[in-house]
């Protein structure tokens, strides 16, 4: 499905809210409805009416990559995760045409630098790229001797990454991981989109004792949620906030499995 054309914005909303959203936006076209998610194409100007949607429904509107709006179910949790999953399945192989690839690669390089500084990243080590998407980190680590393992909920993303040579997993495949524990993990532009605690638990449990996870939180979204999950699993914040050169990266934070006073 071709998602965008000029002067249009694509909205995803819970199917139960379709009527209200369409009423608030005026003329808009429903492109599809699957898995309880409605996909709407609307004219750019309709975006101004989003406040009306939010007022009428009490839902949250999350703007994404300029052209997209996710109208999030009221409660955090699996319903939001399903909307996010649906969104990435729609973007699929076109994902890199919508992002600033250089910016994401720079973010990944910054996160790896943090892993190196606080987890001791080196040749022969195996690192999880959590929310790996299309596997951009392969470019960043090319020739480093560090192995990447990609974890992502979206099958399309995983298949692009694995066609590029990354070993990939669904998060639940790491639950009760019996292989060698991984040396560390990073997450670029993904943690603010994670609503399923079990996924973080799976990745966290696959790390070696004392292993670290470095992630960025775009616009600080999801920071409190992920931090509370990590504390619930006995982890701590190792580095609370790292200044970075690109405002869009948001806050970079390092968590550790070790207790920190
Ligand atoms: C914005 S993309 C970032 C991709 C890549 N890390 C980058 O920097 O270009 C977010 C990715 O996170 C994945 N994702 C969202 N929720 C997830 C979850 N709960 N567990 C694992 N991956 C998730 C999406 O499928 C998507 O591929």
Image (cartoon, helix red, strand yellow):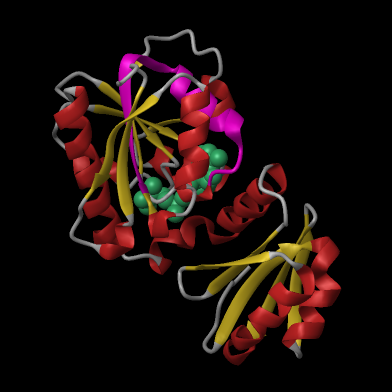
* Residue sitting nearer the eye, 208 or 166: 208
In the image as oriented, which residue stretches furthest toward the front? 261
Left of 219 or right of it: where is 214? left
Q: Residue at x 78, y 69 (%)?
A: 57
On the image, the x and y values in percent for residue 178 come to 48, 8
Q: Is residue 206 magenta?
A: yes
Query: Which percent across, then down, holds residue 240?
Result: 29, 40
Task: Write down the region rendered in magenta.
Answer: 194-216
Against 230, residue 189 (above or below) is: below
Residue under the point 16% across and 23% down: 120
Residue 169 shows up from this direction: no
Q: Quadrant of residue 30?
A: bottom right
Q: Nearer the viewer, residue 243 or 102?
A: 243
Number of numbered discs: 0
Which quarter of the figure is the C terminus placed in? top left
Where is residue 205 drawn, in percent x and y? Answer: 47, 18
The N terminus, quarter of image: bottom right
* Residue 53 visible in the current orientation: yes
Q: Residue at x 59, y 72 (%)?
A: 2
Does 109 appear above or below 43?
above
Q: Is residue 255 magenta?
A: no
Among the 4 quarters of the image, the one containing residue 72: bottom right
Q: Is residue 6 left or right of residue 80?
A: left
Q: Position of residue 127 (x, y in %)?
A: 30, 27
Name the residue: 20% across, 52% down. 243
Is residue 251 placed above or below 47 in the rendered structure? Answer: above
């Amino acid at each position: 499905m071709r998602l965008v054309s000029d002067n249009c914005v694509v909205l995803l909303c819970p199917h139960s809210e379709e009527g209200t959203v369409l009423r608030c936006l005026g003329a808009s076209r429903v492109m599809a409805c699957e898995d309880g998610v409605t996909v709407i194409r609307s004219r750019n100007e309709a975006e101004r009416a989003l406040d009306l949607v939010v007022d009428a429904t009490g839902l949250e509107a999350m703007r994404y990559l300029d052209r997209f709006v996710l109208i999030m179910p009221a409660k955090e949790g699996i319903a939001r995760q399903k909307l996010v999953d649906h969104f990435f399945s729609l973007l699929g192989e076109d994902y890199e045409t919508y992002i600033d690839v250089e910016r994401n690669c720079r973010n990944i390089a910054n996160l790896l630098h943090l892993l190196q500084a606080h987890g001791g990243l080196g040749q022969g080590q195996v690192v999880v790229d959590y929310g790996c998407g299309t596997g951009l980190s392969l470019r960043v680590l090319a020739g480093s001797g560090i192995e990447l393992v990609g974890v992502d909920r979206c099958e399309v993303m995983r298949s692009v990454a694995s066609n590029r040579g990354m070993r990939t997993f669904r998060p639940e495949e790491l639950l009760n991981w019996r292989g060698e524990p991984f040396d560390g993990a990073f997450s670029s532009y993904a943690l603010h989109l994670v609503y399923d605690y079990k996924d973080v638990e799976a990745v966290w449990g696959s790390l070696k004792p004392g292993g670290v996870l470095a992630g960025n939180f775009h616009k600080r979204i999801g920071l409190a949620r992920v931090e509370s999950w990590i504390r619930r699993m006995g982890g701590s914040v190792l580095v609370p906030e790292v200044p970075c050169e690109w405002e869009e990266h948001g806050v970079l934070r390092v968590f550790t499995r070790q207790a920190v006073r």
